[in-house]
Image: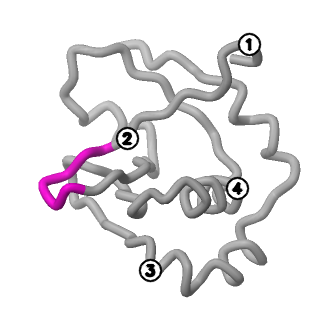
Amino acid sequence: MRESGPLGFLHKDDLGGDYATVFTSEAKIRSVQTPLNKYSQLVNFSEMVTFLLNSGMDGIIINPSEEHVMITREVLMEYYGVLEKTCKDERMNSAIFHMFVMEE
Protein backbone atom coordinates (compact mmCIF):
# COMPACT_ATOMS: atom_id res chain seq x y z
CA MET A 1 0.00 0.00 0.00
CA ARG A 2 2.86 2.40 0.68
CA GLU A 3 4.00 2.10 -2.96
CA SER A 4 0.58 2.26 -4.63
CA GLY A 5 -1.19 4.56 -2.19
CA PRO A 6 -4.47 3.86 -0.45
CA LEU A 7 -7.26 2.22 -2.39
CA GLY A 8 -10.95 2.71 -1.86
CA PHE A 9 -14.30 1.77 -3.19
CA LEU A 10 -16.58 4.45 -4.49
CA HIS A 11 -20.29 3.89 -4.63
CA LYS A 12 -21.93 5.31 -7.75
CA ASP A 13 -25.59 5.69 -7.01
CA ASP A 14 -28.65 6.35 -9.12
CA LEU A 15 -28.46 10.01 -8.14
CA GLY A 16 -25.27 10.34 -10.14
CA GLY A 17 -22.95 11.00 -7.22
CA ASP A 18 -19.58 9.80 -6.01
CA TYR A 19 -19.77 8.54 -2.43
CA ALA A 20 -17.28 6.90 -0.12
CA THR A 21 -18.58 3.74 1.50
CA VAL A 22 -18.31 3.04 5.21
CA PHE A 23 -19.35 -0.14 6.98
CA THR A 24 -20.03 -0.30 10.69
CA SER A 25 -19.19 -3.97 11.23
CA GLU A 26 -17.65 -7.04 9.67
CA ALA A 27 -21.13 -8.53 9.28
CA LYS A 28 -22.24 -5.49 7.25
CA ILE A 29 -19.27 -5.91 4.89
CA ARG A 30 -19.97 -9.61 4.48
CA SER A 31 -23.59 -8.92 3.51
CA VAL A 32 -22.48 -7.17 0.30
CA GLN A 33 -22.75 -9.46 -2.72
CA THR A 34 -19.83 -9.01 -5.11
CA PRO A 35 -17.61 -11.25 -7.23
CA LEU A 36 -14.62 -9.14 -6.12
CA ASN A 37 -12.42 -9.86 -3.13
CA LYS A 38 -13.41 -7.94 -0.02
CA TYR A 39 -10.97 -6.06 2.18
CA SER A 40 -11.54 -4.11 5.36
CA GLN A 41 -9.65 -1.04 6.42
CA LEU A 42 -9.66 1.14 9.50
CA VAL A 43 -9.80 4.88 8.88
CA ASN A 44 -9.33 8.13 10.70
CA PHE A 45 -12.88 9.32 10.02
CA SER A 46 -11.95 12.99 10.30
CA GLU A 47 -9.18 12.60 7.69
CA MET A 48 -11.53 10.66 5.43
CA VAL A 49 -14.08 13.47 5.54
CA THR A 50 -11.35 16.03 4.83
CA PHE A 51 -10.20 14.00 1.81
CA LEU A 52 -13.77 13.58 0.61
CA LEU A 53 -14.48 17.32 0.80
CA ASN A 54 -11.17 18.29 -0.82
CA SER A 55 -11.78 15.81 -3.65
CA GLY A 56 -15.21 17.18 -4.52
CA MET A 57 -17.03 13.97 -3.65
CA ASP A 58 -20.74 14.01 -2.89
CA GLY A 59 -20.82 12.33 0.51
CA ILE A 60 -20.68 9.07 2.42
CA ILE A 61 -22.97 6.06 2.32
CA ILE A 62 -22.92 4.03 5.52
CA ASN A 63 -23.73 0.32 5.10
CA PRO A 64 -24.71 0.32 1.42
CA SER A 65 -27.06 -2.50 0.41
CA GLU A 66 -28.51 -2.73 3.92
CA GLU A 67 -30.29 0.03 5.78
CA HIS A 68 -27.88 2.48 4.12
CA VAL A 69 -27.56 5.97 5.49
CA MET A 70 -26.45 8.74 3.14
CA ILE A 71 -24.57 11.72 4.52
CA THR A 72 -24.39 14.42 1.88
CA ARG A 73 -21.51 16.76 1.22
CA GLU A 74 -23.59 19.65 2.56
CA VAL A 75 -24.15 17.90 5.90
CA LEU A 76 -20.47 16.97 6.15
CA MET A 77 -19.50 20.58 5.53
CA GLU A 78 -22.00 21.81 8.13
CA TYR A 79 -20.68 19.44 10.80
CA TYR A 80 -17.01 19.41 9.74
CA GLY A 81 -15.85 21.20 12.91
CA VAL A 82 -17.70 18.77 15.15
CA LEU A 83 -16.40 15.76 13.19
CA GLU A 84 -12.84 17.02 13.38
CA LYS A 85 -13.13 17.65 17.11
CA THR A 86 -14.76 14.33 18.00
CA CYS A 87 -13.43 11.91 15.35
CA LYS A 88 -9.84 12.98 14.78
CA ASP A 89 -7.51 10.34 16.17
CA GLU A 90 -3.89 10.83 15.13
CA ARG A 91 -3.14 7.21 16.08
CA MET A 92 -5.24 6.18 13.05
CA ASN A 93 -3.27 8.21 10.48
CA SER A 94 -1.21 5.25 9.24
CA ALA A 95 -4.20 2.87 9.21
CA ILE A 96 -5.04 3.85 5.63
CA PHE A 97 -1.88 2.03 4.50
CA HIS A 98 -3.16 -1.33 5.78
CA MET A 99 -5.95 -3.51 4.40
CA PHE A 100 -7.20 -6.83 5.71
CA VAL A 101 -8.55 -9.54 3.46
CA MET A 102 -12.04 -10.72 4.37
CA GLU A 103 -12.08 -14.48 4.00
CA GLU A 104 -15.42 -16.11 3.21
Q: Residue at x 58, y 83 (%)?
A: 79
Q: Amino acid at mark 2?
A: Leu
Mark positioned earlier in the residue sequence (4 or 3)? 4
Percent x, y of residue 70: 32, 67
Above or below, comparing residue 104 to residue 19 in the picture: above
Cα–Cα span, label 3 and label 2: 18 Å
Report which residue position mark 4 lands on.
Answer: 47
Percent x, y of residue 28: 34, 43
Cα–Cα span, label 4 and label 1: 20 Å
Residue 72 lies in quadrant: bottom left
Numbered range of the magenta stretch: 11-16
Say if mark 3 contacts mark 2, CB within 8 Å.
no
Q: Secondary structure at mark 3?
A: helix
Cα–Cα span, label 2 and label 4: 16 Å
Say if mark 1 contacts mark 3, CB within 8 Å.
no
Q: Label 1 crowding class (10 Å Cα cut-off): few <14, some 14-19, many 20+? A: few
Report which residue position mark 3 lands on.
Answer: 74
Cα–Cα span, label 1 and label 3: 33 Å
Percent x, y of residue 75: 46, 81
> Does residue 103 appear left or right of residue 70 in this picture?
right
Q: Residue at x 81, y 58 (%)?
A: 89
Report which residue position mark 1 lands on.
Answer: 3
Q: Label 2 crowding class (10 Å Cα cut-off): few <14, some 14-19, many 20+? A: some
Q: Residue at x 55, y 56 (%)?
A: 52
Mark positioned earlier in the residue sequence (2 or 1)? 1
Q: Amino acid at mark 3?
A: Glu
